[in-house]
C-alpha cells in the first residue's frame, strides 16, 4: 500500500513568486492534514480536511495560503505571493478517522530567496 | 505554557539500556496520544499510539499514559544505535478540533 506522497520534495523560489505543493494521502483516508516546520521550531498545524471539506483552518498563517482538496482525494497548498518567512518544511499527513493514527509524507522543503 | 512539552535533550544512553522519554500536555481534554520518530532530514514516522491510561507495549517500545497527571512517556528497551533520532510527542483533543499538537521533540543518542 502506498504511503502519503508529496510533490515536489524541494522547491526554491524567489520572494513574490507562487508555489503549489501537492499531497496524495493514503487511499481511503478521509482526513488530510497540512503541517509546517520552520527551522528550530515544532511542527505546526496548518489545516485539516475531512474529505473535501475544511474542518479546521485555524493554523493558516494568512490569506497568502490557499489549500484545496477537490473531490476529497489529493490536496494542494498554494502560497501566493511567497515571502521569506514561508521557508520551511511542509508536511502532509492522513488518517482514516479523525484524531487517530496519522501517517506523514516525506515533506516538501520550501526555500524562499 | 506550551501545549505539549518535551525536554529537547540530547538524552544519551548506552547501547542495550532503557531510554525513557517524557512528554506533558496542558489540555485535559486530550484523548489520543502518539509517539513519532524523526531521523534528521526525514519525515515523522509513527511508532506508537495510546488512547487509555496504562501501558501499551509493542516490541521494544512501551508507551505509558497517565491522564490525571497529564503525561505520556515512551520507553525503549535494549536501545540500539539505530534508535538515535528525535522523538516527537503528539496529542489530539477529539473535540472542537482534531488537529495533532506536537512537542518540539527529544533528541536521543544511543552510544555504541
Image: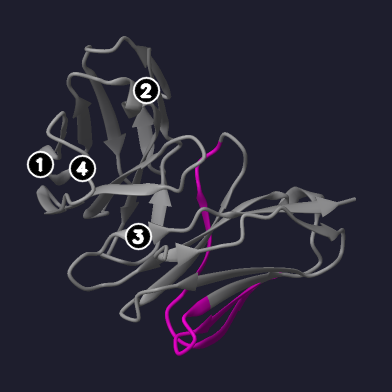
Disc nearer the start of the sequence (1/2)? 2
> Height in image: B68 above or below A52?
below
Disc nearer the start of the sequence (2/4)? 2
Read off the chain for label 4.
Answer: A
What whole-number distance in Å separates the C-alpha atoms at marks 1 and 3? 24 Å
C-beta proximity under 8 Å, tags 2 and 4 = no
The number of discs equals 4
C-beta proximity under 8 Å, tags 1 and 4 = no
> Height in image: A108 above or below A44?
above
SS state under label 2 = loop
> Percent position (x, y) of residue B106?
62, 56
Residue behind mark 1:
A71
- Residue B59 visible in image: no
Badge nearest the viewer, 1 or 2: 2
Q: Which mark is residue A60?
A: 4
Read off the chain for label 1.
Answer: A
> Percent position (x, y) of residue B100?
35, 60
> Height in image: A96 above or below B39?
below
Say left or right for A52 vs B87.
left
Rendered-image quadrant of the N terminus of chain B: bottom left
Residue behind mark 3:
B100
Q: Which mark is residue B85?
A: none
Q: Which mark is residue A8?
A: 2
Q: Main secondary structure of the magenta part?
A: strand
Read off the chain for label 3.
Answer: B
Badge nearest the viewer, 1 or 4: 4
Marks 2 & 4 on one chain: yes
Badge nearest the viewer, 4 or 3: 4
Amino acid at each position: 500500500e502506498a504511503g502519503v506522497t508529496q510533490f515536489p520534495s524541494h522547491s526554491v523560489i524567489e520572494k513574490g513568486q507562487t508555489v503549489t505543493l501537492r499531497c496524495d494521502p493514503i487511499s481511503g483516508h478521509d482526513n488530510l492534514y497540512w503541517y509546517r516546520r520552520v527551522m528550530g521550531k515544532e511542527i505546526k498545524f496548518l489545516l485539516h480536511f475531512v474529505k473535501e471539506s475544511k474542518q479546521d483552518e485555524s493554523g493558516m498563517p494568512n490569506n497568502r495560503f490557499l489549500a484545496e482538496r477537490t473531490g476529497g482525494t489529493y490536496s494542494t497548498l498554494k502560497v501566493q505571493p511567497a515571502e521569506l518567512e514561508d521557508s520551511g518544511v511542509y508536511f502532509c499527513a492522513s488518517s482514516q478517522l479523525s484524531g487517530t493514527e496519522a501517517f506523514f509524507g516525506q515533506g516538501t522543503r520550501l526555500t524562499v530567496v | 505554557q506550551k501545549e505539549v512539552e518535551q525536554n529537547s535533550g540530547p538524552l544519551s544512553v548506552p547501547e542495550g539500556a532503557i531510554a525513557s522519554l517524557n512528554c506533558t500536555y496542558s489540555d485535559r481534554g486530550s484523548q489520543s496520544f502518539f509517539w513519532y520518530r524523526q531521523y534528521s532530514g526525514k519525515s515523522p514516522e509513527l511508532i506508537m499510539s495510546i488512547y487509555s491510561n496504562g501501558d501499551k507495549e509493542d516490541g521494544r517500545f512501551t508507551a505509558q499514559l497517565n491522564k490525571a497527571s497529564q503525561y505520556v512517556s515512551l520507553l525503549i528497551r535494549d536501545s540500539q544505535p539505530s534508535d538515535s533520532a528525535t522523538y516527537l510527542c503528539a496529542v489530539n483533543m477529539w473535540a472542537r478540533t482534531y488537529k495533532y499538537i506536537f512537542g518540539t521533540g527529544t533528541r536521543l543518542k544511543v552510544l555504541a
